[in-house]
């Protein structure tokens, strides 16, 4: 059996009881280590699980998945995923490969940013398409995410913006030359993606952890904050839709930088605010 097991958002104790039982009994346990990161290192996981955890980087998961799937038809193999297993298309792909090899599969779900984003106070039912903003290079500058944000804006829906991370990545030159030299980790921050407008937005950092941070303001206000105002990764951004409900504004005002949050909600978004 091949298992995809979600680990949640914070540390080794966020795994579900069912997931932990599978990990303890599996023949091999891998940790997918590039689409997201936990707030603890591999050694903490191994100490809590009582067994070895093998790091699976992008190259192993996307191009050498046979190594992970080998023997899964006759024994239990687990791939641990930060958040929920279906939070990244990579995990759909490895499940399809397993099915093509007639390997039985099972998925153990967990919390992810896709549902924990509700902690900011905006209703999950009012979100549109989630988008990811990738780091650009000199030769690769995708902008399809911008069109999806515009579609959400047109429908008055909120937009969850996932900010890119680069872990164990190679430069284009090293990749072309076949050199296994890896760049230092990089984490996109809200400050690097913001444009100065009066659109309401929330910047979220380390959601689901004890050091979770939420800042609410206009994009212009958030853009003036220094990088250290957001703290360490992971980071995400929410663009507030025009159909925002008064209860959402009341809840999110807890995170507001200043009184402009309520003023813009009233004057620009036409939200009926009973008291300020």
Image (spheres, rainbow, N blue to C red):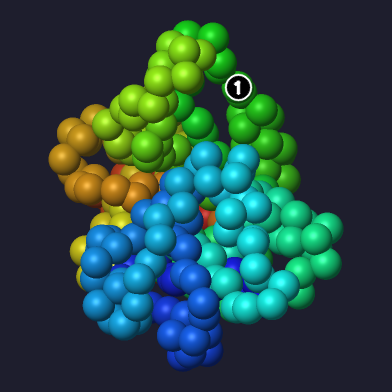
The picture places residue 221, in percent across and down from the top left corner, at 30, 35
**In which quadrant will I find the N terminus?**
bottom right
| Image coordinates for residue 39, horizontal then vertical, percent | 28, 61
Q: Quadrant of residue 147?
A: top right
In this view, 263 is above or below 113: above
Q: Is residue 201 above or below residue 22?
A: above
User: Residue at coordinates 25% horizontally, 77% vertically from top-left?
Assistant: 47
Nearer to the camera, 152 or 262? 152
- Quarter of the image with the C terminus is bottom left
Q: SS at mark 1?
A: loop
Image coords of residue 77 (percent x, y)? 57, 72
Viewer-proximal residue, 207 or 259? Answer: 207
Residue 80 visible, this orientation: no
Q: Residue at x 26, y 61 (%)?
A: 41
Please name the residue shown 35% across and 77% down the image. 51
Give the quarter of the image for residue 260: top left
Which residue is nearer to you in this view: 250 or 171? Answer: 171
Q: Mark 1 points at which residue?
A: 142
């Amino acid at each position: 059996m091949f298992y995809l097991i979600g680990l949640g958002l914070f540390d080794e104790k966020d795994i579900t009881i069912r997931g932990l039982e599978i990990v303890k009994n599996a023949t091999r346990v891998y940790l997918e280590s590039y689409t997201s990161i936990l707030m603890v290192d591999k050694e903490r996981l191994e100490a809590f699980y009582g067994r070895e955890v093998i790091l699976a980087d992008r190259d192993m998961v996307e191009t050498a998945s046979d190594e992970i799937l080998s023997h899964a038809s006759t024994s239990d193999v687990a791939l641990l995923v930060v958040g929920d297993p279906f939070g990244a298309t990579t995990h759909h792909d490895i499940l399809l490969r397993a099915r093509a090899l007639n390997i039985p599969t099972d998925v153990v779900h967990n919390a992810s940013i896709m549902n924990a984003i509700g902690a900011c106070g905006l209703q999950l039912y009012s979100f549109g398409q989630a988008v990811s903003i990738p780091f650009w290079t000199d030769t690769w500058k995708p902008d399809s995410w911008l069109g999806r944000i515009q579609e959400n804006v047109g429908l008055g829906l909120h937009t969850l913006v996932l900010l890119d991370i680069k872990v164990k990545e190679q430069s284009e030159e090293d990749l072309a030359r076949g050199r296994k030299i890896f760049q230092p980790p990089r984490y996109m921050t809200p400050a690097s993606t913001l444009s100065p407008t009066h659109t309401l937005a929330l910047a979220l950092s380390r959601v689901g952890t004890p050091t979770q941070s939420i800042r609410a303001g206009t994009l212009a206000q958030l853009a003036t904050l220094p990088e250290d105002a957001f703290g360490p990764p992971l980071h995400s951004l929410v663009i507030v839709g025009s159909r925002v409900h008064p209860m959402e504004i009341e809840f999110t005002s807890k995170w507001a930088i200043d009184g402009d949050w309520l003023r813009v909600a009233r004057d620009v978004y036409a939200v009926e605010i009973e008291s300020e």
